[in-house]
Image (tube, rainbow, N blue to C red):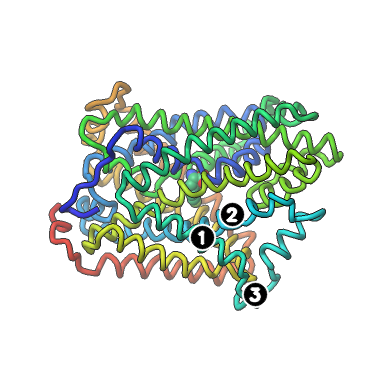
Amino acid sequence: MTETKKTEWNSNLAFMMAMIGSAVGLGNIWRFPNVLYSNGGGSFMIPYIVSLFLLGISFVLVEYAVGFKFKKSLARILFSVSKKLEPVAWFILLIVFLITTYYVCVVGWDFIYIILSLTKAWGANPDLYFANNVLHATDSMSGLFTIVPNVLVSVFVIWFLAWFIIKRDLNDGIGNVSKILLPLLCAIVVIIVAFSLTLPGASIGYTQIFTPDWSALTNLNVWLAAFGQIVFSLSLGMAIAMTYASYLPEGSKLVDNAVIVAFSNSGFEVFNSIGIFSILGFMTLSTGIPFNELVTEGTGLAFVVFPQVFNTMGGVAYIIGPLFFLCILFAGITSVIALLEGVCYSISEKFLIERKKTATAVCIVGFLISCIFATGAGSTILGVFDAYLNNFALLFAILLECIIFGWVYKFDDLIDTLNKNSSIKVGKTWKAVIKYILPICIFGLWAQGVYSTAITADSISIIIMAILTVVLIVVPFIFAKLPAINKDYYNV
Ligand code: PFF
């Protein structure tokens, strides 16, 4: 991570696995099926594929090119582009770090469910069990002062695992773990999908994916939803691709790599949703609950609907249940380590702190922040963090990245960097997308996010968002102002 010891992937496979692992996460497993279903089913694939090519891959390419060309951390890259831009880098990294603090907590809930699923301990009412026995959720903020021990322990376990992986050398930690967890994850998903297709009623579910509602295509919100899914699913703008690409050796085929990563990520979520839909179809057939009531998003789908399904499934649920939650755990861990790597890299490079120490400090601070989510009010605060950071702050950060690299930086240099060794070439169309189309689309998504957050926010959410806004303005300036210990940091 520091100037003295250059970090590099020992194989293209390690890089690809780490990149795919960073993209495949909770968003693929529980966000995609709901977005697909609520935005026209089969016809949603059209805006989805258009967004994938036009916007998703295009932006990943910017991150690849910048990371590969500079071979530096995000903070130092933006400092090199213009000294005034360093706070923007810390702003982006702080958003990523705060996202990680609650993402870890959700992975922690999943960890609890791996254990619960061994005995179906959630009983006949999984919804009540989740709220009362797992989260100990309170309606008011008074719960902020009550720690929920099981959530605290599981959050600690996930932070510990993340620390244990990222403190190691790049190839030994992230590289090897991704090479093990990703194939395991794929194997589990194949088992779940194959099993789900044998269930009675499966066709009620999976035909939804292939039943198009063409009228949805004229709805702007459907296009924004497709784009939003690509942003989330490919982890755009989070400095992940930039960081990972900066560790690539000379001669790497950047464009080819980006296309494979993006296709694998989308392939995973489409394939996985065949399983999710089939299982929900089985549930509709066996209980009579309408299909549309079952396709919920996020925690509702994983921790309420799926336990209900396992209750109706008999003995086989003791195998499929733990596998399902294990799958979320693996997908979550490979994303957490990716989110942390970019943050650690910038800190380590600026303050010349060795990898292990940086990882330890970042994980301790992260764990302390995550403790807020392990209180009775935790799930409420988590919801506000998620809405604010993802719908508002992150999109704003991506917009800034587009403007900086599309307009401030000499963009044509990036074209040369990408085309040098790749078999697939980019040119003027890509440039136009980054300079004009992408900023407009991101702005549309951002405006929609601001609007939906504004109309749904209550007074508590507004207070939390105001605190987050102050933190997101003050802390980046402090980090940018702190003098670099690494004297090379200022060599632009
Ligand atoms: N792309 C990963 C996922 O779909 O879960 C990782 C990720 C995306 C993490 C967005 C956090 C986030 F806000």
Marked residue nearer the N-terminal end (3 or 1): 3
* Residue 206, quarter of picture: top right
Q: Marks 3 and 2, Cα distance to the nearest angstrom?
A: 22 Å
Residue 130 in the image: x percent, y percent?
71, 59
Kindly identify the residue that appears in the image at 46 percent across and 29 percent down. 263
* Residue 407, quarter of picture: top left
**Three-letter code for the amino acid on which mark 1 is drawn:** Val
Q: Which residue is mark 2?
A: 111
* Residue 478, quarter of picture: bottom left
Marked residue nearer the N-terminal end (3 or 2): 2
- Cβ atoms at labels 2 and 1 below 8 Å apart: yes
**Three-letter code for the amino acid on which mark 3 is drawn:** Gly
Label 3: which secondary element: helix
Neighbor class of circle 2 (other Cα within 10 Å; few <14, some 14-19, many 20+) is many
Label 2: which secondary element: helix
Q: Nearer the viewer, residue 143 or 165?
A: 165
Q: Which residue is mark 3?
A: 143
Kindly identify the residue that appears in the image at 37 percent across and 56 percent down. 92
Horizontal side of 351 relative to 216 (left or right) equals left
Asked whether residue 444 is in view, the answer is: no
Q: Marks 3 and 1, Cα distance to the nearest angstrom?
A: 22 Å
Label 1: which secondary element: helix
Residue 213 in the image: x percent, y percent?
69, 28
Task: Give the answer, above or below, for where 327 lies relative to 191.
Answer: below
**Three-letter code for the amino acid on which mark 2 is drawn:** Phe
Q: Nearer the viewer, residue 199 or 339?
A: 199
Task: Give the answer, above or below, for where 438 lies relative to 92.
Answer: above
Q: Which residue is mark 1?
A: 157
Asked whether residue 134 is in view, the answer is: yes
Q: Is mark 2 within 8 Å of ligand 1?
A: no
